[in-house]
Image: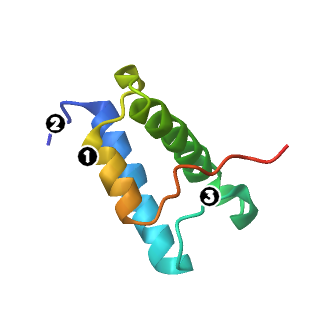
Amino acid sequence: GFIWDARAANWEERFDELVLFKAQHGHSKVTCKYGQAYRPLAVWLKRQRHSAREFIKGKPETGMTDDRVSRLVSIGVNLNIRRSK
């Protein structure tokens, strides 16, 4: 059928990929170390963590929602992970 909201559909696709990754690897800490095939998912997840943190701080323009934050947390996504320098 016709996709009314491409951004929402993309988010759902990536979230489904993340659920599958967790089922296969036992966790939701996707990084590029799992290979090039996981790079898009790793980048998406990094953006979701950032967006969720900003949303929680009161910045709704990130595109994040309460539902998305809850869904990410429900599958074990740690929103506080930051890359070490």
Q: Quadrant of the C terminus?
A: top right
Q: Residue at x 56, y 78 (%)?
A: 25
The residue indicated by pointer 2 is 2
Q: Quadrant of the N terminus?
A: top left
Q: Residue at x 48, y 30 (%)?
A: 54
Q: Residue at x 36, y 51 (%)?
A: 13
Rendered image quadrant of residue 34: bottom right
Q: How is the image coloured?
A: rainbow
What amino acid is labelled 3 in the image? Tyr
Outermost residue, front side:
57
Q: Is residue 61 above or below residue 39?
A: above
Residue 53 position in % (x across, y down): 49, 37
Q: Which circle, 3 or 2, is nearer the viewer?
A: 3
Q: Are marks 1 and 3 in contact (CB under 8 Å)?
A: no
The residue indicated by pointer 1 is 67
What amino acid is labelled 1 in the image? Asp
* N-term-proximal mark, 3 vs 2: 2
Query: How far apart, in angstroms, are the residues tagged by discs 3 and 2?
Result: 28 Å
Residue 65 position in % (x across, y down): 30, 37
SS category of the residue bearing label 1: helix
Q: Are marks 3 and 2 in contact (CB under 8 Å)?
A: no
SS category of the residue bearing label 3: helix
Q: Which mark is residue 38?
A: 3
Drawn side of residue 40 relative to residue 62, left or right: right
Residue 18 position in % (x across, y down): 46, 61
Q: Which circle, 2 or 1, is nearer the viewer?
A: 1
Q: Is residue 73 above or below residue 44?
A: below
Q: Which mark is residue 23?
A: none
SS category of the residue bearing label 2: loop
Query: How far apart, in angstroms, are the residues tagged by discs 2 and 1?
Result: 23 Å
